[in-house]
Amino acid sequence: MTDLPGAPLAVAPILTALNEEGVDYVVIGGIAGNLHGSSYPTFDLDVAYARDRANLDRLVKALGPMEVKLMNAPPDLPFVLDAATLANGANFTFDTRYGRFDILAHIPGVSSYEELCSAALVSEAEGIPIRVASIDHLIAMKRAAGRIKDRLMVEEYLVIADEQERFRRGETGA
């Protein structure tokens, strides 16, 4: 399985749809890393999402126009995009008209969505207001994933975390 998508990633339409429907989410993964200053490329958008019924309903409304299809699923596998399906699952990887989009309810390295939200930063991606996972949570997620590429990213994220801490303390220079 490859990380390269079938369609180029267009982040703005996905984030706009989530925001317009009022979905409770936090951007995680490579896009979050890039917003913190990572130089690693990413080919998908990953978000963590709240699991309450009202948010699942909003998420379904946002996903519908994206023409989501389960990634790597057999073509004859029935998939109904509704709140019950999302409630019965947790993590979904979709191919959309805007590229690959992953929604995650269970995030290795993070104990709960509430914990993730409490440390999330308010930021912007392509001019769209979002909440983005803290660098500390991104480090925890990458450590929990444990793949070679994640271990390499942890090293860069640790440098970014140190730089952010020095900035918070008002230190300048190398």
Image (cartoon, rainbow, N blue to C red):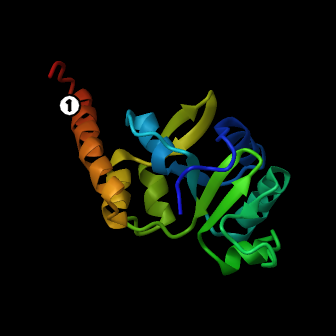
Q: Residue at image x 28%, y 34%?
A: 164
- Residue under circle 1? 166
Residue 80 left/right relative to 43: right
Q: Residue 78 location in percent, x, y?
A: 81, 78
Q: How many marks?
A: 1
Helix, strand or loop under label 1: helix
Residue at image coords 81%, 78%: 76
Q: Measured along the vertical axis of the image, is residue 5 above or below residue 53?
A: above
Question: In this orientation, which residue lies closer to the viewer: 19 or 74?
Answer: 74
- Where's residue 147, x and y in %? 34, 62
Task: State the residue at coordinates (85%, 51%).
Answer: 65
Locate the C terminus and report the quarter of the image it occupies: top left
Let me know if residue 122 appears in the view: yes
Q: Residue at x 40, y 65 (%)?
A: 110
Residue furthest to the front:
1
- Residue 76 sits above or below residue 146 on the image: below
- Residue 55, quarter of picture: bottom right
